[in-house]
Amino acid sequence: MALALFDFDGTITCRDSFAGFIKYLVGKIGFYAGVACLTPVVTGFLLGFIRAWRAKELMSIFFFHGRDARKFEESASRYALEELPRIVRRNAMERIRWHQQRGDTVVVVSASIASWLRGWCEAQCVDLIATELEVKGGRISGRFLTRNCSGREKVRRIAERYDLSNFDYIYAYGDSPGDGPMLALANERYYRWKRVWPPNMTTD
């Protein structure tokens, strides 16, 4: 029995789903106006003063804080089914189907938010491990309920969900340094869809 681990943004998709969902939720004008307000955060990230996960959380707080959780999840579900299929790579879907035909356990392991990945993953009959948002009093706070699912956190979450000793072979697919530890778990690794040896990558 084999386990197939897929990063989502940039691996299964050709574009970032985080920015895509915000645009879907608030519109392009609202998105770019918000990004302008977040210039200090973006600058701090580019200069190395703010870590990637924190910049992402601050963006999440800015755009999502105070939204009704039920309506937010409904919007996320629509985005998953209406918009995500448009940015999914054909070769990624072919590879997922190949694994499923073999009877492998297929898992999306993503730093993106589970809310808008869940519906897509359920439609494709694949498991999901992703970053979860905090809900307080029926409203989205924008803060992360779990640690950002990147780097070593991907490995921790995978090991928490699955007993890796139950699998005879592990495949992993990624496209960024944050996928390095997950790729290193695998017997067969693909980085930007090219088969590689364990990559030498730093992680957040």
Image (cartoon, grey):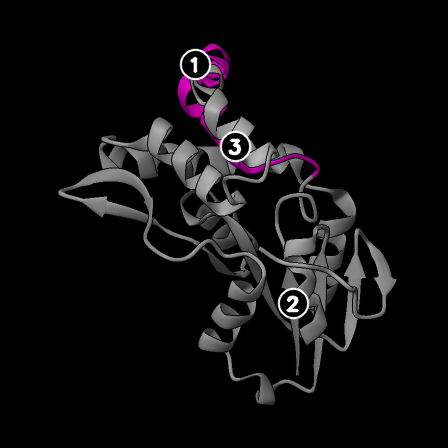
Q: Which residue is mark 1?
A: 30
For discs 2 and 1, the disc positioned in front in the rendered view: 2
Q: In this picture, which residue range is highlighted in magenta?
A: 14-33
* Amino acid residing under circle 3: Gly
- Closer to the chain start, of discs 1 and 3, is 1
* Amino acid residing under circle 2: Pro
- How far apart in space, not on screen, are marks 2 and 3 (Cα)? 26 Å
Label 2: state its secondary structure: helix
Quarter of the image for residue 107 reads: bottom right
Mark 2 closeness class: few <14, some 14–19, many ≥20 residues within 10 Å: many
User: What secondary structure predominates along the stretch shown in magenta?
Assistant: helix
Label 3: state its secondary structure: helix
Q: Is residue 4 left or right of residue 41?
A: right
Q: Is residue 162 above or below residue 121?
A: below
For discs 1 and 3, the disc positioned in front in the rendered view: 3
**Is residue 152 on the magenta stretch?**
no
Quarter of the image for residue 96 reads: bottom right
Q: Residue at 52% across / 39% down in the picture?
A: 49
The dot on residue 181 is 2
Q: Is residue 197 above or below residue 169?
A: above
Residues 114 and 101: in front is 114
- Residue at the farthest left position: 137
**If the image is split into quadrants, where does the N terminus sit?**
bottom right
**If the image is split into quadrants, where does the C terminus sit?**
bottom right
- How far apart in space, not on screen, are marks 1 and 3 (Cα)? 22 Å
Q: Is residue 179 left or right of residue 137?
A: right
Q: Residue 146 location, x and y as percent? A: 37, 57
The dot on residue 44 is 3
* Amino acid residing under circle 1: Gly
